[in-house]
Image (cartoon, helix red, strand yellow):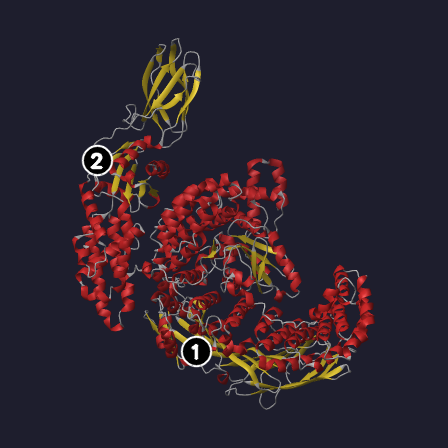
Amino acid sequence: MIHSLFLINCSGDIFLEKHWKSVVSQSVCDYFFEAQEKAADVENVPPVISTPHHYLISIYRDKLFFVSVIQTEVPPLFVIEFLHRVADTFQDYFGECSEAAIKDNVVIVYELLEEMLDNGFPLATESNILKELIKPPTILRSVVNSITGSSNVGDTLPTGQLSNIPWRRAGVKYTNNEAYFDVVEEIDAIIDKSGSTVFAEIQGVIDACIKLSGMPDLSLSFMNPRLLDDVSFHPCIRFKRWESERVLSFIPPDGNFRLISYRVSSQNLVAIPVYVKHNISFKENSSCGRFDITIGPKQNMGKTIEGITVTVHMPKVVLNMNLTPTQGNYTFDPVTKVLTWDVGKITPQKLPSLKGLVNLQSGAPKPEENPSLNIQFKIQQLAISGLKVNRLDMYGEKYKPFKGVKYVTKAGKFQVRT
Amino acid sequence: MSSNSFAYNEQSGGGEATELGQEATSTISPSGAFGLFSSDLKKNEDLKQMLESNKDSAKLDAMKRIVGMIAKGKNASELFPAVVKNVASKNIEIKKLVYVYLVRYAEEQQDLALLSISTFQRALKDPNQLIRASALRVLSSIRVPIIVPIMMLAIKEASADLSPYVRKNAAHAIQKLYSLDPEQKEMLIEVIEKLLKDKSTLVAGSVVMAFEEVCPDRIDLIHKNYRKLCNLLVDVEEWGQVVIIHMLTRYARTQFVSPWKEDDGLEDNEKNFYESDDEQKEKTDKRKKTYAMDPDHRLLIRNTKPLLQSRNAAVVMAVAQLYWHIAPKSETGIISKSVVRLLRSNREVQYIVLQNIATMSIQRKGMFEPYLKSFYVRSTDPTMIKTLKCYNFLTYVKSQDKQFAAATIQTIGRCATNISEVTDTCLNGLVCLLSNRDEIVVAESVVVIKKLLQMQPAQHGEIIKHMAKLLDSITVPVARASILWLIGENCERVPKIAPDVLRKMAKSFTSEDDLVKLQILNLGAKLYLTNSKQTKLLTQYILNLGKYDQNYDIRDRTRFIRQLIVPNEKSGALSKYAKKIFLAQKPAPLLESPFKDRDHFQLGTLSHTLNAKATGYLELSNWPEVAPDPSVRNVEVIELAKEWTPAGKAKKENSAKKFYSESEEEEDSSDSSSDSESGSGSESGEQGESGEEGDSSEDSSEDSSSGQESESGKFPSKNILWYIPQEKEKKTKQDRNPLTKDVSLLDLDDFNPVSTPVALPTPALSPSLIADLEGLNLSTSSSVISVSTPVFVPMKTHVLLHRMSGKGLAANYYFPRQPCIFGDKMVSVQITLNNTTDQKIENIHIGEKKLPIGMQMHVFNPIDSLEPEGSITVSMGIDFCDSTQTASFQLCTKDDCFNVNIQPPVGELLLPVAMSEKDFKKEQGKLTGMNETSAVIIAAPQNFTPSTILQKVVNVANVGAVPSGQDNIQRFAAKTVHSGSLMLVTVELKEGSTAQLIINTEKTVIGSVLLRELKPVLSQG
């Protein structure tokens, strides 16, 4: 399947290569560079490129290209998913997936890649298993290693891969047994000029952090499971239980993992917690325009909205902006034409606003459309869909774990057209 | 510090210095300073020293740096010898890194790589399954053709390993070996077949992958595993799921009839969405052929459904394409929700998914309607994604991204043509766009409007006028050409404007783009024909211009038009029709999506994405007209019973299970076959699946079918439960029918009294078959092999020294097959010396011996003289150390020395052993796995009589026959002369003129050589 992998940085250097079958020359990447040149923007490089003898499937993550070489038919999503899994693993191991991190840990990277693929077919991709095989680097360990000469490779061999529960290893032990769940919901919305919602949906995930000894068997139930009709599960979840009882029943992996992700798409269930009053105009035949936006709370269920940021991609003809915020700071980057306004919290008594003038290139025709506003915000202790965890039960182990659920709502791709 | 040590080095030099150097490097850069690699040789020298040090930390350090070099793509191959030495290191990390290195460079340094093989062979027998697995992994990754036989052995061994993890690695190794040496295909298919029966979820994905790679056309191997795969699917790891689903899609397309009703074929859409199921049923009932879905087909569709909720986009897409290709059209609706969910994922996933959605929505239009909003474009999406989104849907014309806007406009055009009600709206929108300031947008609009107007030109005179005005401002050639064409085509409707336009164009003709020039010529010609009064001169002028144009296309066109429209004598006939030619009604163009033609590729594949056939793309076959026999999939009898039994009858099911296993056991106890078979029987009883791990598929199917027979005989009331099995039984019998005719030896022990065909409720056997069977029974029971009689083997003599090269002295040797009198580790050899000269040959003796290490030779006593024409036979003993290495020595006479050598056939390195069948089995049980080699032999049935087999085997090898209780199995035992290791040969006759040859021995090399020699002998006539 996957023949070789090349990691390429933004400036086009191939800084790592790994082959799982016979060696493929680096020159194959020239086709990729060609496509990259054509695409102008890194985001527009086609993920699948066909060359005379190979196919290149690439992903772009954290300013790095992961380019894989394929020789025969394979579902492209398969490769793409896998490459993302590789990037996730690096992220998990090194805290970031950057060129520097990979170069510093080149041996671990190599060991990881060796374990993740065998002959181009995925072998071990579960982070629990990988961490048993190859210990992630920590500062302490690297110091200890350099003194004692011991290594990152686990001494004990993993057991999980050999059982029916490949995602969990045996013999997990904690002094404090705890299970925490984060319900994180993101609102994706498009609000049109007049303020009505064109499109809105909630993308939710439940991330779990589980540190429980032994082989706990958990079941998580919801107050209103009907909300979840479009869900994707971590492999540990038993489909049948969910189908019949709407209960999430699973033996969890050890540590952090994403339990489920879901989508609430029916629009009337999606509350829009903020509104924006805007007045952006450019005058014909004049080199200035007006810019005025005000943000206010709406349907916020009594919680404070915080961490508000507004980002606007201004038209190219905008030279500079001269604005006054009533609250927070703003920056305008004249090169990328991005206006960022860091608002902070909304206090209903005094709504934050940003007003001022826009300087345009003189002589250039006025922009024909107004830019749209991308808004970020955060609401603690609230799942905007109304999803609520009912209870968590544990079977199979005797101890009493600490349990906790946290709810957060965030803006996802939240866009207001002006 | 380093300079100090350097100075010291110079003074003293030698070994001490190098050691110091190592110390220095290992203490200075303990964590291996990556990035400091210089390519100069000195550095590598340094690494070599570190590798040779006896400190693990130094070695580890060196290995880390070497891996760093590999990662950068730098050549580190010259360190190979130094690295390979460390392959047996105790330190796991060093070992791992050495593995990494080996796999990368073994291909380049094959000879040296061989040094490491023995380490892996040892590791293959390690008690720890992970070590076994990783040894197999590395061994199979070393792409050195010489070790193919070793890999083959290791794979076979591993495929029978107790640990599913090792078996999974064996499945991976299959592909590696196949790509290294495709000639091993047949053997590998056997292993695949074996592994396909594996019930572990761990193995399933990998073995299906191997199947797809090695023998995707052997769909017959899937039949018996189909249901198991369907049922296991949910628990298989995600990557395996993708592969299995793709494979099952292909399988389903060949094995089931189409669930799509023909008349609503591809255009089926809303109908199915709004019609209730009942209605549909009624509808189908009315049809001549009522369609009932094969339960297995249903099973697949049902079992894949939960996977739509996988977190892995590839799995979701795989299920989506499965539904798309094999599910009834009314059920495909459920995939759209999950597929749309994938759009939230990263850009690459979006790209692929949208492409697939494009194909789907073109064919079944209603499918994604409810999710229309998800396709709304965000200004932050990359252009690539935007373009894709808009191919199907929206109208984001005002976007800042003009390329994107242009694509949008094209889409609008397509919307307009497809949905006639909105054409006007679209047209209006487009006309508005004509006033847009951006050229690309306008140009694109013009092109689209042109296409639209071509469809309904009647009412749109106004638009044409507007466009004519635009001609002054637009510079994009395509748009100008389009406008000109439009005007030319509709010149009768705009009689005033058209000549004016032509006038303007004539002025600017020379500066126009080629495309526009052609259209000017066309316009001129058209106007000339319709309105020659006003435009005659203009047209002439333009034609003259065109005549001298640089572009030959334009010159050609000019000439053509002139001949056609300007009347002269020659072209009289044609010019009459000129008007018809130019002003013919043009058919409206079809605006088609670029995704239209992708539908012939399987969704979700690379080929689909590229819209070109990728290497290794497997065509999805069309539905068969008639379904192939569904009973081929019936193995898992209990599974079936579960499916057909209503929920309330669980108890009955249990009892059935028990009966089944009982009869199985009964079967086995009555059957005096080997241990392995009875093992499989009991296991199948527990698992509720018939002997899947039996020695071969034929065996197990036979077992299970006879099990069913007895079952149905004893419990006719359970007939409902066994509905399918009976059908299957018929099938197996019919299958067997032809076989019985030409195979004289058939294991009929299975047909015990309980299971006689008479007990069947319906006679499934034809009378002739019964007669056949009876006849067989007699013949087999009468044939008895007398094993104890020693078989005479014709003496095979080999030439040791030809008389021509021996100056008249000739020497031949043969192996008398007797224990050697000179030593019990020696093989006795008899040499016959002939004097062909006319003189006495004196003092014949053995001179210098060049024997491989360990080999010994007991020479014969010197012969004083040999008379002319005389001959003498002498005995020698040679200890070949159980190898087929050559013993070279010199045969000397008084005057000359001749170099001669003896290479023993492998069969002569053995001594027969007398052994009982029980002992044989016991010993065989100890020598399984790695120590077992086997091959399938195909030969005419007459070659498979016990006596011929005995004769043939004994001819090749010095083995002793073991009395056998079964007619179809013959056993031979021997021990190697040197080490006394047992060598057990089994020939087991199978149906269809095949036999399996199994050799069990510790001496795997000799075993495999013997196998190779026996194989052709047994299969030849």
Q: Is residue B599 left or right of residue B121?
A: right
Type of amino acid at the residue the image marks with label 2: Val
Q: Chain of mark 2?
A: B
Mark 1 packing: few (<14 Cα in 10 Å), some, or many (20+)?
some
Which image quarter is the C terminus of chain B in? top left
Q: Position of residue A329 (x, y in %)?
A: 65, 80
Which of the labelled discs sits on residue B787, or is there none? 2
| Quarter location, residue A297 | bottom right
| Label pair 1/2, CB-CB below 8 angstroms | no
Residue at the extreme top: B839
Which residue in the structure is indicated by mark 1? A228
Label 1: which secondary element: loop
Q: Position of residue B259 (x, y in %)?
A: 40, 69
Q: Position of residue B907 (x, y in %)?
A: 33, 32
Name the one closer to the observer, A156 or B860: B860
Q: Is residue B529 left or right of residue B591?
A: right
Residues beneath discs 1 and 2 located on the same chain = no
Name the one closer to the observer, B884 or A14: B884
Q: Visible in this render: residue A92? A: no
Mark 2 packing: few (<14 Cα in 10 Å), some, or many (20+)?
some
Q: Chain of mark 1?
A: A
> Taking B630 as reference, is A339 above or below it?
below
> Taking A27 as reference, is B487 above or below it?
below
Label 2: which secondary element: loop
Q: Visible in this render: residue B592? A: yes
| Quarter location, residue B392 | bottom right
